[in-house]
Amino acid sequence: MSFREILQQQQRGLEFMGNVGVIGLHMVSGPLVGVAIGYGLDAWLDTGPWCKLIFLLVGIGAGFLNVYRDSRRLLDRMAREDARRKGRQEAGQAAEDGPAHGQPPATDAEQRHDRP
């Protein structure tokens, strides 16, 4: 493994850690924003705790929705990375093994990329 590949792998790891940190922030920020909006509306409309409760529930829902979306995005990205890594490994293995089973061996012209 070259130094450049090690740096790229570390960068991908840090990006994933950053995405996980954003998921945690969304869990907290949704309810906090909901309570802040409810508090402001309660003070303005003099409605007691009702706006706080309603907007707290809305904030919790928004937080969970954001967490779900971020998690799906992160899982899809991880699946693409794994598929890409598998494809590279299979391509390297196929190059070492020669022609795949069931395929005729390459002719001299195909090996030299000559066109008849």
Image (spheres, helix red, strand yellow):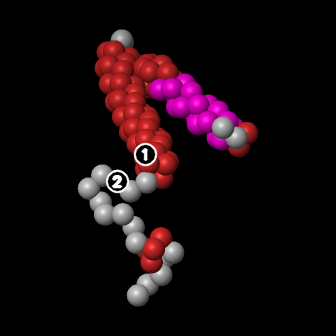
- The residue shown at (43%, 45%) is 90
Query: For residue 21, what is the image quadrant?
Result: top right
Q: Which residue is mark 2?
A: 100
Q: Secondary structure at mark 1?
A: helix
Q: Which residues are magenta?
A: 5-23
Query: For residue 47, what is the image quadrant?
Result: top left
Query: For residue 71, what is the image quadrant?
Result: top left
Q: Secondary structure at mark 2?
A: loop
- The residue shown at (65%, 41%) is 5
- In this rendering, the answer to whether 68 lies above or below 42 is below
- The residue shown at (49%, 21%) is 24
Left or right for 113, reference 6: left
Residue furthest left in the image: 102
Q: Which mark is residue 90?
A: 1
Label 1 is placed on what type of residue? Glu
**Nearer to us in this view, 11 or 29:** 11
